[in-house]
Image (tube, rainbow, N blue to C red):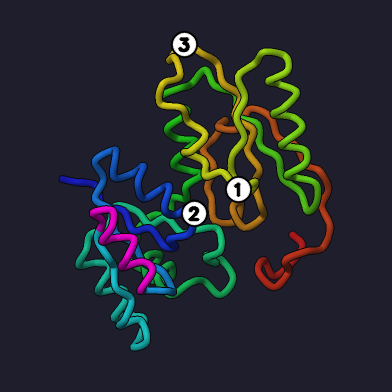
Amino acid sequence: QQIKALIIGVGKGGQSLDLQLKKRGIKVYVTDGNEKSAQQFANNNGLSLFTNANTQNNQSDIENAIKEHSFSFVSPSAGVPTKLNPNPIISACNAVGVPILTDLDLFLNEERLQRPQNIQIGVTGTNGKSTTVAILTHLLNCFKLSAQYAGNIGVPFFDAINEDEPQDTTNFRVLELSSYQLENSSIPNNAIDFSIFTNITKDHIERHGTEE
């Protein structure tokens, strides 16, 4: 039975994930608050549109639509809330038992299975993430180590993978992880080799609810 994925959001990260999943033989459905953009992206790339036109009705309508498609998992973009005041599609997926797997989860799972020799470095914090990620990646490359950055710095996770890189090469993936990305993810055990916290201050409380 073919794997079916529902991707919420057709921004830069969502588009990258859509195309990577399609390349891996997964049936990809896309949805977005801007349905016209989602439709255009789906049409241009041979993907399917999951229309949310009926989400104005009630939660049971969305749940029924999710059930009818038999999605294997749903992947929300970082801007889609999943905990406090969750997106209606996320609530429906939770109600019918569709797992949430973000692009970060999927990337780390593939790295662990396909390229287990690679070193994953996660960088998070309120301020200074991008600077830390950029400097660290530069220093690693200066020491003739193969390093790529990805994540909240503006490069989708899967775009850090060079399809031509030798399988026996150890690559350092320096990942900028925002609080939004971490909230939505369920990072696999031991998937991050090194973690860096730049600092933590009171921020994005409207999204997370509390500092914790």
Query: The disc labelled 2 sits on which kind of residue?
Result: Lys
The quarter of the image holding the N terminus is top left
User: Is 179 on the left or on the right of 100, as rendered?
Assistant: right
* Tag nearer the camera, 3 or 2: 2
Query: In the rendered image, which residue does mark 1 sit on?
Result: 154
Disc 3 residue type (three-letter): Asp
In this figure, which residue is indicated by the disc labeled 2?
12
Nearest to viewer (mark 1 / mark 3):
1
Residue at horizontal 69%, vertical 73%? 206
* Residue at 41% from the left image edge and 53% from the top image edge: 15
In terms of sequence position, does the residue under pointer 3 or pointer 2 come before the other? 2
Type of residue at label 1?
A: Gly
Residue 183, disc = none
Mark 1 in CB contact with mark 2 (< 8 angstroms): yes
Of labels 1 and 2, earlier in sequence is 2
Check contact, mark 1 vs mark 3: CB within 8 A: no
Residue stretch in magenta: 36-47
Residue 49 in the image: state x and y as whole percent: 27, 65
